[in-house]
Amino acid sequence: MWVKLVRELGRYDSAVLTGLDAAGYPYSVRCQPDPDAASQTLRVRLAAETPLQPGPASLLCHRHDEVLWNQRSFLARGRLVRQGDAWMFQPTQLVPGIGVEGVKGLVRFVITARRNARRYLAARHLPRPRIPWADINAAKAAARARRAGGQ
Amino acid sequence: MSAASPAPSDLALPPEVAAVFREFRTCEFSTLARDGTPITWPTLAFWEPAPGRFLLSTSIALAQKAFNIRRNPRVALLFSNPTASGLARPPAVLVQGDATAPDEVLTSVRGFEDKLQLVFERQPASGMYSSNRVMRWLFDWYYMRLGIVITPRRIRWWPEGDFLAAPREVEVPGVG
């Protein structure tokens, strides 16, 4: 996992670190994690008054282009640990997001998504709903017209 | 903290923060897993200034965030990726709040036409999911949505995205 994490991390300029504050709310900051191969942890530099608590945390990297496409992301689950003035993120699990696992991953994603939707509906005894494609396509056409009009 | 939503226009956002809510294409949305780990994924969020809340949605095929919210409503939205926003040196903004995710499968676009159109303007390639019969069969689950409403409790922001500086804070009315 460590090798894969460091390889993926190298594709991004920064990452979003999320831990918990004292009230139990998620608290996120953007940072530049620095891999420490010896301990297989990531050193993160945080502002002195950051209200993050040691404990469960995650690290997200994501990117998209100017038209919100060509997306790529991954999430590392783990723990945030304080060592004196320094903060370390100890990763325990790597969760690939969109764009990481290629075509195979996309196929697996669609199959899993269809199964999850079926199970969600079945658990609630709901029929598979009809989608208002005409309304969706109308919104698409309106967007296309607006882009073509240069607005 | 009070459970009341801010009244219209009670939430006085600095113009640069309002611009971030309006123009950023994604935010980093965090919910809490069963073991307390914050789980963060990039998401589209719509800011509604009048009721002072955010609207999001997720497909029933990707319902984990909704399950997390139903167990623990504490969430956060970080706006820190300015790609495609057109904003020059915008602040980064963190919204912490309480979310609801009712167990109601939404498919109708009535009342959301403007938001759907905005998604297609900003992400034209997503039109492929409804482009022909095969794609509509493969991706119908994508349009079976669960609505998520977030009421802000605390809004902090970092000018020019400098997280090593102390953040500024927007006062959220009604929060003790």
Image (cartoon, coloured by chain):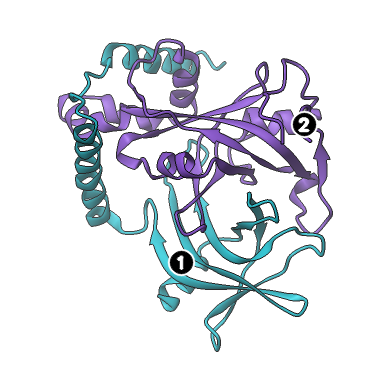
Chain colours: A cyan, B purple
Horizontal placement of A50 versus A58: left or right?
right
* Residue found at x 43% / y 47%: A71
Residue B90 visible, this orientation: no
Q: Chain of mark 1?
A: A
Residue A68 % position (x, y): 48, 38
Disc on res. A8: 1
In terms of image quadrants, where is residue B104?
top left
Numbered disc 1: secondary structure: helix
Name the kind of residue labelled 2 in the image: Val
Q: Chain of mark 2?
A: B
Numbered disc 2: secondary structure: loop
* Residue found at x 18% / y 34%: A122
Disc on res. B14: none
Residue A79 % position (x, y): 55, 69
Q: CA distance from mark 1 to mark 2?
A: 38 Å
Disc 1 with disc 2 on a shared chain: no
Residue A49 higher or lower than A45, as above or below: above
Residue B49 higher or lower than A19, as above or below: above
Residue B101 % position (x, y): 46, 32
Q: Residues within 10 Å of mark 2 (few under 14, many from 20)?
A: some
Front-lying residue, A48 or B72: B72
Front-lying residue, B124 or A94: A94
